[in-house]
Amino acid sequence: MRKFSRRDFLRLAGGVAVASALPNPAWAGILDRLLHEPALLRPAITPNDKFYVTSYRSAPDIRLDQWSLAIKGLVEKPLTLTHADLLARPAVAQIVTLECVGNGVAADAISTAEWKGLPLKALLDEAGASSQAVDVIFRAADGYSDSIPLARARAGDVLVAHTMNGVPLPRGHGFPARMIVPGIYGMKNVQWLTEIELVGEDYKGYYQQKGWSDEAAVKTSSHIDLPGHGGVVKGREALVQGFAFAGTRRIKKVEVSFDDGETWREAQLEPELAPAAWRFWSYRWELPKPGRYSIAVRATDGRGRLQSTEEQAAFPDGAGGLHENTVNVIA
Ligand SMILES: Nc1nc2c(c(=O)[nH]1)N[C@H]1C(S)=C(S)[C@@H](COP(=O)(O)O)O[C@H]1N2
Ligand SMILES: [Mo]
């Protein structure tokens, strides 16, 4: 059986945070702490076995003695790295949130990990990438491919990752190497990487050939974790919590509405986990008279742009619209 964790306690306590009805001051202290502390409902870092999975086929079985990573195309000096070469090079670690382009407001295909690996920039420099190159193509052992522009590939935050939350990439998440491109939808974070090729024209990958966005920058989105949809709250106030995400544009502001978007109140932001990770927020809701209320959330990115409030399907460039939970306030 699972241990009863702080997170579970918050699930129970978060919906019914009652200061006035408390029997004794000790409890008041505990609940008060819960209300004031950063209380994360989903863990800030997703455990590997809870990390969302998307692949167009099943994960390939890769034998390390047969695996290598080629860097080729418009380069002065093509390279081939064995698995030992990959692990021997200086690696950097960073926390990055991945989101599937098909993720909706229910937020079931978004997760965060600490990824460690080689900066792609170092490999491009070593191979002598030509400035004639337009796109950098990533090809994989399962036949999948995608690309990013050379200019994006040269930034220091793009990784050829071999480690996920401190362990070698699990087979289901790209073993032995995958791309991590912060701020771009999951589809461009190619797993089971075998080849990096620089080409002089725009390349259309697996999903682009099916009409999905090639730019694929994540849209600004926000999500309410607590109270959940259909949740019940009572007492003087309840803690409303969730996360927002805008990729590398970061999150500047989160607001919540309890009156169908007529008025908005600013939520409190938790400290930033990392520049391209989700950001948690909370709001202490002074409870109104009993009844059904819809809670909505919206985020503003670091450039001052409000997320799109218009409902939009995931195809072709990511879902739009506000997340809302209906909650019952009882006496
Ligand atoms: N080789 C390969 N890489 C891939 C895919 C795939 O099918 N094959 N799916 C992509 C998609 S659509 C997403 S959302 C992410 C998901 O990564 P995850 O399963 O580790 O969360 O991997 C991307 N990389
Ligand atoms: Mo995806």
Image (cartoon, rainbow, N blue to C red):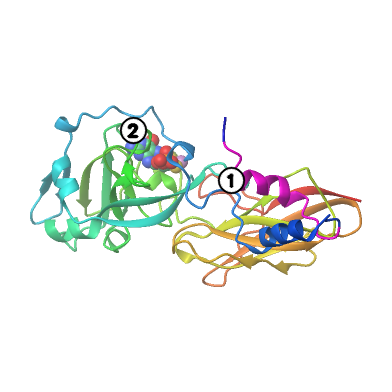
Mark 2: few, some, or many residues within 10 Å (few <14, many ≥20)?
some
Q: Is residue 300 left or right of residue 52?
A: right
Q: Amino acid at mark 2?
A: Arg
Between tags 1 and 2, which lies in front?
A: 2
Residue 9 painted magenta: yes
Q: Position of residue 268 (x, y in %)?
A: 64, 67
Residue at the spot x=35%, y=29% of the render? 59
* Residue annotated with mark 2: 171
Q: Position of residue 165 (x, y in %)?
A: 38, 47
Q: Is residue 84 left or right of residue 59?
A: left
Looking at the image, the residue that sits furthest to the left is: 77
Respond yes or no on whether mark 1 lies under 8 Å from ligand 1.
no
Is 114 above or below relative to 121? Answer: above
Residue 36 painted magenta: no
Q: Position of residue 76 (x, y in %)?
A: 8, 57
Is 317 above or below relative to 275? Answer: above
- What SS does tag 1 mark? loop
Nearer-N-terminus badge (1/2)? 1
Q: How many marks?
A: 2
In the image, 195 versus 169, the foreground residue is: 169
Residue at the spot x=78%, y=48% of the render? 326
* Residue annotated with mark 1: 107
In the image, 206 versus 302, the foreground residue is: 302
Classify the position of ligand 1 by quadrant: top left, top right, bottom left or bottom right. Answer: top left
Residue numbers of the magenta segment: 3-20
